[in-house]
Image (spheres, grey):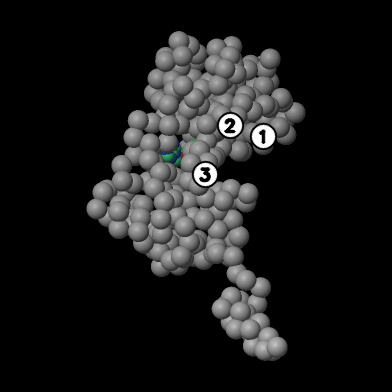
Amino acid sequence: VPGLYIVATPIGNLGDVTLRAVDVLSRCDRVACEDTRVTGKLLKHLGISKPMWRYDDHASERDREKLVDACRTQAVALVSDAGTPLVSDPGYRLVRDVREAGIAVTTLPGACAAIAGLTLSGLPNDRFLFAGFIPVKEKARADFLDDLAGIDATLIFYETGPRLLKSLTAIAEKWPDREVAVARELTKLHEECRAGTAAELAEHYGEHAPKGEIVLLVGPPAEQAPGGDPDALLREALATLKPS
Ligand code: SAM
């Protein structure tokens, strides 16, 4: 059936491709992907051969129009290099344009590093906020973290090995008491999840340079007792107790 199919692919372990993803990738007319080499490998692993179109961050409006047009008459599968398309990956403009053109769009959920990291971290997950990549420049990084400071939720970031230490150091300064987790190489051979304060983790990764792909998570701010300092509240309460 013609239209756009948003297809999640594995984030490391190739076993994490869904039955529905295999079905749609086998039967679609073409695959729109970020990098034809990366997606070519996945398709080859699945025994599938399809024409591929590059659709990445550099795609022009004209590229998008072409793809929207193709969706009118063809089944087009949109994939990214890994995980769920559109999550820190290209695609939302394409989805918007396809919807606006009145063409069918559907989604095939699957692996997503942010959610995999959250589930493994042991941090509260009733409320969470995915904030993408932390900016590299010092001032932008500080402003970015300040904006998130008051949010009562677990924060999820995407991170890279070379930048992890700077992010941990910045977090240690701003939020020394919050619980932090580093989830690395999820679903792969060297999967690791390490928790502690940002300072503890900075010390560890200062000595063991982190390799591979990383999700960085920061637990919610500690609950404030109503009225602030719990010790002060206790003292107040004790002061009102009269000896019998
Ligand atoms: N769309 C993808 C998803 O659904 O997770 C994310 C794409 S984003 C460009 C790539 C980032 O995702 C990496 O820098 C890393 O932070 C995170 N990531 C991807 N695969 C990962 C894995 N296996 N383990 C940990 N983090 C991963």
Left or right: where 63 falls relative to 11: right
Q: CA distance from mark 2 to mark 1?
A: 8 Å
Q: Nearer the viewer, residue 146 or 139?
A: 146
**Type of amino acid under label 1:** Asp
Q: Is residue 117 above or below residue 225?
A: above
**Type of amino acid under label 2:** Arg
Q: Which residue is mark 1?
A: 97
Question: Which mark is first along the chain, 2 or 3?
Answer: 2
The x, y position of residue 4, in whole percent, is 64, 24
The residue that appears at 46% across and 65% down in the rendered structure is 177
The residue that appears at 31% across and 42% down in the rendered structure is 211
Rendering quadrant holding ligand 1: top left
Q: Are discs 2 and 1 less than 8 Å apart at CB?
A: yes
The x, y position of residue 108, in whole percent, is 61, 26
The x, y position of residue 160, in whole percent, is 37, 46
Left or right: where 202 falls relative to 177: left
The residue that appears at 42% across and 14% down in the rendered structure is 44
Q: Which residue is mark 2?
A: 64
Considering every residue shown, the one lying at the far left of the view is: 207
Nearer to us: label 1 or label 3:
3
Instruction: Assess disc 1: are there few (<14), some (14-19) or many (≥20) residues with their C-alpha within 10 Å of its C-alpha.
Output: some
Question: Which mark is first along the chain, 1 or 2?
Answer: 2
Q: Which residue is mark 3?
A: 118
Query: Which element type, helix, strand or loop, lies under badge 2?
Result: helix
**Type of amino acid under label 3:** Leu
Whether label 1 lies within 8 Å of ligand 1 gets the answer no
Q: CA distance from mark 1 to mark 3?
A: 31 Å
Considering every residue shown, the one lying at the far front of the view is: 244
Q: Is residue 235 above or below residue 99?
A: below
Instruction: Assess disc 3: are there few (<14), some (14-19) or many (≥20) residues with their C-alpha within 10 Å of its C-alpha.
Output: many
Q: Quadrant of the C terminus?
A: bottom right
